[in-house]
Amino acid sequence: MNKKIKTEAVDHLFEAILNLKTQEECYLFFEDICTINELLSLSQRFEVAKMLREKKRYLEIAEKTGASTATISRVNRSLNYGNDGYDMVFNRMKGKKEQ
């Protein structure tokens, strides 16, 4: 974990997020806390990560998501050398679908 982001303010934000219970609550909260572009950028990166895990090619990912190759490369670096946060979430989402 990056020690630069470990602050009391970030802790409070994550605590708030962990209190959300439904997708509708997520929409309400994130529309208040993020600009539309910030939210779309986050969701784009998440979609890029999903497609990279599915072994899609950069060109296909760029065409489908509108992400630049620089963004795709940054997400790919996080998947390969990051904290495994994407993998943790994708595995949990997969587990829920299988139930």
Image (cartoon, grey):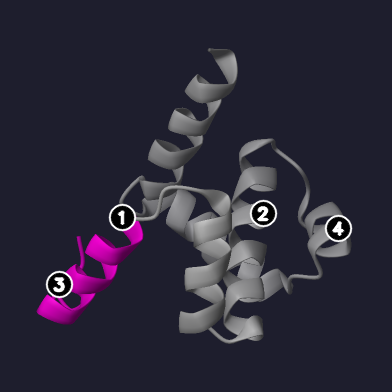
Give the labeled residue for mark 1.
19
Helix, strand or loop for disc 2: helix
Q: Is residue 65 left or right of residue 89?
A: right
Give the labeled residue for mark 2.
47
Q: Marks 2 and 1: in contact by CB < 8 Å?
A: no
For label 3, the crowd category at 10 Å Cα-Cα, with few meaning under 14, some 14 to 19 and many 20 or more, is few
> Does the segment drawn in magenta span residue 30?
no
Q: Position of residue 54 (x, y in %)?
A: 68, 35
Helix, strand or loop for disc 1: loop
Q: Residue at x 81, y 64 (%)?
A: 62
Label drawn at residue 6? 3
Give the labeled residue for mark 4.
64
Q: Name the amino acid type tagged 1.
A: Asn
Mark 2 or mark 3, which is nearer the start of the sequence?
3
Q: Which residues are magenta?
A: 1-18
Q: Residue at x 46, y 29 (%)?
A: 91
Q: Residue at x 50, y 48 (%)?
A: 22
- Distance of label 3 from label 1 (alpha carbons): 19 Å
Q: Is residue 86 left or right of residue 8?
A: right
Q: Marks 2 and 4: in contact by CB < 8 Å?
A: yes
Q: Position of residue 32 (x, y in %)?
A: 50, 82
- Distance of label 1 from label 4 (alpha carbons): 32 Å
